[in-house]
Amino acid sequence: MQTLQVDLGERSYPIHIGANLLDRPDLLVPHLVGRQVAIVTNETVAPLYLDRLHRSLEGRQVQPIVLPDGESFKNWETLQSIFDAMLSNRHDRKTTVIALGGGVVGDMAGFAAACYQRGVNFVQVPTTLLSQVDSSVGGKTGINHPLGKNMVGAFYQPSLVLIDTSTLKTLPRRELSAGLAEVIKYGLICDEPFLAWLEDNVEALLALDDASLTYAIERSCAAKAKVVGADERETGIRATLNLGHTFGHAIETHMGYGVWLHGEAVGAGMVMALEMSRLLGAISTAQRDRAIRLIARGGLPVVPPEAMTPDDFLAHMAVDKKVLDGRLRLVLLKTLGEAIVTDEYPKALLEATLTANYHDIAEEAGINRESK
Amino acid sequence: MQTLQVDLGERSYPIHIGANLLDRPDLLVPHLVGRQVAIVTNETVAPLYLDRLHRSLEGRQVQPIVLPDGESFKNWETLQSIFDAMLSNRHDRKTTVIALGGGVVGDMAGFAAACYQRGVNFVQVPTTLLSQVDSSVGGKTGINHPLGKNMVGAFYQPSLVLIDTSTLKTLPRRELSAGLAEVIKYGLICDEPFLAWLEDNVEALLALDDASLTYAIERSCAAKAKVVGADERETGIRATLNLGHTFGHAIETHMGYGVWLHGEAVGAGMVMALEMSRLLGAISTAQRDRAIRLIARGGLPVVPPEAMTPDDFLAHMAVDKKVLDGRLRLVLLKTLGEAIVTDEYPKALLEATLTANYHDIAEEAGINRESK
C-alpha cells in the first residue's frame, strides 16, 4: 500500500492506494466522526462492492443509498434523493458520507456532504480509474445543469481517499480507457518522463497489471495533489489540469451527457489542444503525433464527433467556467510535458483548430482508420 | 456610519451600518470582482430599493433577479431559478451576487453564490431588522427541505455587508418585532447590560428612532461577529446563538413555513427556553418574568401555538441539526445574560417544559391577555 498526503493546512487528508483496501477497517474507521454512515453508490457498483465495504463498517448505523448509474443522473433530482434518504433516516451533523463508485457518484456524494446540514464528514472510495486519478483528488464536487456541466457545486475536501486497485478488475474496458485519458494528461501537462513511461507501459495498464496500475495511479495522484495543494480554488496553475477539457466539455454537452464518456471527450479534446499548440508553434508536428499515438493506444477517440460544427463548439465554450470577463482562456502546451493557461492567441487560430480535419491528422500520426 | 470588521482570517469582511448607505457606491464598488453583478431580491423589496442600488452600480452589467416573497419559496425551485437566470445571462466566475432583501433572500442568494460554478463573490444588503442583526452575519446560507428547515446549505462568507437603517422605514411592524426577537436574544445569552438598555429603549426601537436602531444593530452585530469569529463552523460557543431556535424551528416546521415569522417562533421558543432554565434552577421566576415581559413588549408572542402537542415538538426537534448522536442538545440560560449548550438535563424536565401552561406563565409575568 502507498500513502500520499494532500497538503491543505487543517483540511489535509491522506490517499491510500493498494489492492483490497475495501477490506481494511483499520484504514477507514479512524476517519469516521459519529456512529452514522451513509454509503452513496449506484446500481452497478452496489452488487459488486457494497457488502465488502459494509463489513468494514461493523457496529455502525450504515445506510446504503443506491443511485441510478450514469452521468445523465448527475442532477438535482438525484441529489435530492440523497437528502431525502438521509433526512428520513435522521442523519445528524456527525454523520459520514462515503462515496463508493466513479466520478459521478463522487461528485454527487461530495456535493451532498458539502450541503447536508451545511457540511458533514466525507470519505471517497473511488472504483473507476478516472475517479481514482482525477475526481477523488482536489475537492471539486457538483451536479450538471441543463445549461452546462458542473455549473452547480462546491469545493469540499474529503477526510480520506481510499483507492482499492482491485476494483478495476470489474471495470468495462471503455471506462478503463477513459481513465487513461487523465493519466496521459498528467504526462502531457507536467511530467514528460511519465509520458515516456506510459509509452512503454500503456498495454500493461490496459491488461490490468497490478504493479503498473499502482505506479500510474500513485504518480497521477501525486501530480494532481501537488497542483491542487498549490492552488486549491483554481485561480492559477490548477487550471492546467483542464487540458482538453474545454473542448471536451463542449463535446459532452453537445452530444448529451453520458453519450461520450468524460475521458473519451477529454481524449479528443486533448488532440484538439495539441493541434492548437502546434498551430501556435509551441510543439512540433512530430511531438503532436507522438502524443496522439499514445492517446489512440490508450483506446481513446482522437477525432471529435462528426456531427459537431465549429459553431457548436463555440456556443458551448462560451459558458465554460474558464471564460473570464468574456475572454476564452484555454489550456495549451508550451512543450510536451508543460502546459500554460492563456487567452492570448489569435482568434483565427482557434477557428483553424475547430475546422481542422482530425481524420487526416490521425492518419498523419500513423493511426489506421479502424482504431480511430 | 459605523463599521465592524468580522475577523475570519483571509475571509474577513466589513459590516457598514448607517442611514442611506444604498446610495454609497464608494462603499460597494471596491468589493466587486468583475464587471458582472446579479442582484437577487424579491417582488416586495424590488419596487422599493432596486433602482437605488442599481444606480450605485453604474457602468456594470447588472442583472436583477426578482424572486417571489416569503419563506415558503425558500426551496430548490426558487434557487434553481437563480441559476437559470445567471447561466442564461452567462455570468462567469468573476461575477458578484448581491442579496437585497431579508433573511430568505440572503440565505438563497448566499447559497446560490456558494454553489454557482463552485463559488462566486457575494455581498449582503439586508433590508429587514432580522437579517441586519442576524442572518447577514456569520455565513450561514441555505434552503429548506420538506423534512426540515435549513437542511441544505453552506457556510459561505460575504465580502461585504451593507446595512442601510433607512430601509426599516418600510418594514411591516410585525417584521420589525420579529427582528427584535434576535436583538433581545443577544442580551439574554451574553450581554445583561444590553438587556437593561433594551428595557429602557424597546419603545424607541419600535418607533424607528434612528439613534436607537443604529446602537441596537451595531451592538447585536458586534455580539454575533464576536461569537462567529470565535467559532465559525458552530462546533461550540456559536450554538448559543440558537437560544429559542430549537423550539422555534419546531413551531415553524409544524405550522408550515411562513405562517409564523421566524422571529415570532423564536420569541415563543425563548419563552420555553426561559421556563426550562427556571425549572433547572438556573434562573429565578422573577428573572424569567422580566425576560418574558421584554419579549412581549417587543410585540412578540410569548405562548406557543395552541395546536401543538408535546409530541409535535419532539417529532420536529429530533431532526434538528443540534441533535448529535441521538441526544438532544439545547441552549439554556445559566443566568440572565449567559447561555450554555447542554444535553445533560433530566428528560422529564424537557417534558415539563413542553406541557407547561404558557398562558398562565404569561399572566404570572404580568402580561394581560390581549397583548399575548
Image: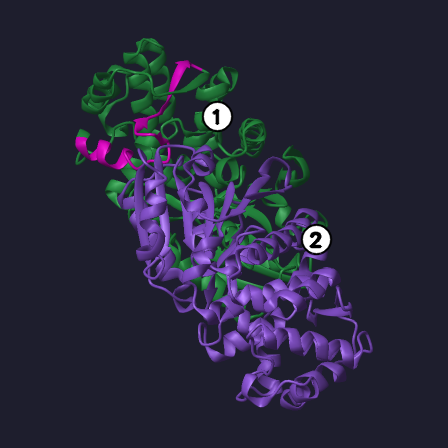
Chain colours: A purple, B green
Camera-nearest label, 1 or 2: 1
**Where is residue A360 drawn, in percent x and y?**
66, 91
Q: Residues within 10 Å of mark 1 (few under 14, many from 20)?
A: few
Q: Earlier in the sequence, mark 1 or mark 2?
A: 2
Q: Chain of mark 2?
A: B
Front residue of A135/B81: it is: A135
Numbered disc 2: secondary structure: helix
**Where is residue B368 drawn, in percent x and y?**
25, 23
Front residue of A222/B93: it is: A222
Q: Is residue B30 above or below residue B181?
A: below
Q: Reply yes or no: does residue A228 show up in magenta.
A: no
Q: CA distance from mark 1 to mark 2?
A: 35 Å
Where is the C terminus of chain B found, in terms of image quarters? Answer: top left
Q: Residue at x 33, y 19 (%)?
A: B274
Where is the N terminus of chain B found, in terms of image quarters? Answer: top right
Q: Chain of mark 1?
A: B
Q: Which mark is residue B29?
A: 2
Q: Residue at x 31, y 41 (%)?
A: A62
Q: Is residue B222 above or below residue B104?
A: above
For the question of whether residue A116 can be seen, the reply is: no
User: In the image, which residues are magenta?
Assistant: B311-336
Q: Quadrant of residue A117?
A: top left
**Where is residue A153 drawn, in percent x and y?**
50, 56
Q: Is residue A69 above or below residue B332?
A: below
Q: Residue at x 53, y 67 (%)?
A: A206
Q: Horizontal placement of A109 versus A354: left or right? A: left
